[in-house]
Image (spheres, grey):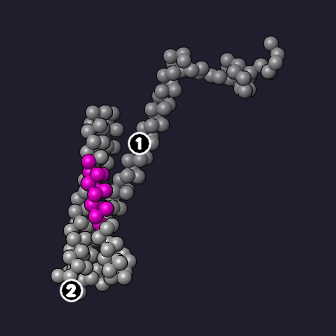
Amino acid sequence: MTAPADWIAELEGTLADLVPILGRLRGLLVDQREAVAAGDLTRLLAVTTEQEEASARLQHLEQRRERLQMQLEHALGVRGLYALAEAAIASETRREEFLAVVYELLRAAVALQEERERAAALLTAAIEVSLRTRSFLRRAAGSEPAYTAAVGFPGTPLAPPQGEP
């Protein structure tokens, strides 16, 4: 087995290892959304810890994938996983198997991105509600004026002109 053949096998294994990590991160985003929606801070903290661990694993695998892919691209004079498969794998069956892993990884990455967008939207909405609630509570407690115009603060339409008593 030549170096590129060894590298392509290692790259394929790394790509295959990335798929369940992406799936795990996607599942954790679902768990995060559910914890936020339920207001379950304990669960949210536990999910966050799991996300950090899975993200560290993802980073490790992604670095390995990048290193292997760059080595192969340099050795074979091509760019991209499809081109690597064409250049490094003679057997059509093996090439199709390799590309099946690539496509599975792509589907997992797209699903994760879609879940991230949903989670970001929910977290943004939760933050906005929290800020509105905080402002309401400040007004209710009297630490923030409820109606700045009505009490005549400078710069408001009903404020007395500056310099006049």
Residue 70: where, in percent of width, then height? Answer: 34, 72
What residue do we see at 59% from left, 20% from top? 145
Give the mark nearer the N terminus: 1 vs 2.
Answer: 2
**Vertical position of residue 66 compared to residue 26: above or below:** below
User: Alpha carbon of mark 1 to alpha carbon of mark 2: how far?
Assistant: 48 Å
- Taking the view exactly as shown, the residue that stands out farthest to the top is 165
Q: Mark 1 — residue?
A: 123
* Three-letter amino acid code of the residue under disc 2: Ser
- Residue 91, which numbered label? 2
* Three-letter amino acid code of the residue under disc 1: Leu
Which secondary structure type mostly characterizes the magenta part of the structure? helix
**Vertical position of residue 121 compared to residue 100: above or below:** above
**Vertical position of residue 23 compared to residue 147: above or below:** below
Magenta-tinted stretch: 53-65
What residue do we see at 51% from left, 21% from top? 138
Q: Is residue 156 left or right of residue 45?
A: right
What residue do we see at 62% from left, 22% from top? 147
Callout in the foreground (1, 2): 2
- The N terminus sits in image quarter: bottom left
In the rendered image, is residue 103 in sight?
no
